[in-house]
Amino acid sequence: MPQPDHLRRIRFWLALFIIGLVLSCVTAFPLETEVDSLLSLLNHASIRPFAQSIHLLPWTERVNEGLQVTNAHYPFLAYGTDWLAFAHLVIAVALFGPYIDPIRNKMGDHLWPDRVRWCNPTRLDRGRLPWHSNSMATY
């Protein structure tokens, strides 16, 4: 049985939004690596004059330096972007229910325990948990 046109449109926009949320989540974790890669791309001989003319290269160099210094001296500040990424992922998963059945959606009520369980795996790349003794020495 074909879907009504309005359900197709709802599913299209929900899928687009879910993809955007997941991409935002995935790109929020490796910020320093991403900015390093962008800086390497902007320093390429064919792009460098344009990047300098619009002041993108100096700005990216400053952002890169800020990220490196911050991550070296204050790595716990990265938890903020980790939690932002985690929130994007939670919202994306919560929208699967409306995507599957926009009319009768009850999935949001069942996802809360899963959201809490996801918290720790998203922080594994940051070293030991902050409330452990001597945790700052591992950063």
Image (spheres, grey):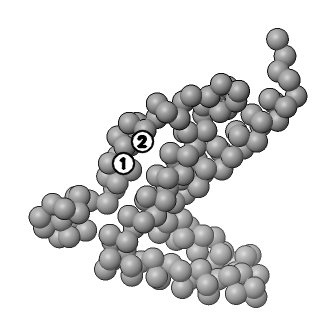
Q: Secondary structure at mark 1?
A: loop
Q: Quadrant of residue 123?
A: bottom left
Q: Residues within 10 Å of mark 2 (few under 14, many from 20)?
A: some
Q: Secondary structure at mark 2?
A: helix
Residue type indicated by callout 2: Arg
- As measured in the structure, the alpha-carbon distance from the residue carrying label 1 to the one carrying label 2 is 7 Å
- Image-based side of 80 in relation to 89, left or right: left
For the residues bearing labels 1 and 2, Cβ distance under 8 angstroms = yes
Quick check: can you spot residue 84? yes
Question: Quick check: 36 above or below 1?
Answer: below
**Residue 96 at x, y = what percent?**
60, 34
Foreground residue among 109 and 33: 109
Question: Quick check: 33 above or below 5?
Answer: below
Q: Quadrant of residue 35?
A: bottom right
Residue type indicated by callout 1: Cys
Report which residue position mark 2 lands on.
Answer: 115
Q: Quadrant of the C terminus?
A: bottom left
Q: Which mark is residue 119?
A: 1
- Image-based side of 6 in relation to 100, left or right: right
Residue at the outermost right position: 5
Foreground residue among 23 and 33: 23
**Residue drawn at x 55%, y 46% as measured from the top left:** 91
**Residue drawn at x 49%, y 52% as measured from the top left:** 87
Quick check: can you spot residue 33? no
**Residue 81 at x, y = what percent?**
46, 64
Question: Quick check: 9 above or below 137?
Answer: above
- Image-based side of 46 in relation to 125, left or right: right
Q: Which mark is residue 52?
A: none
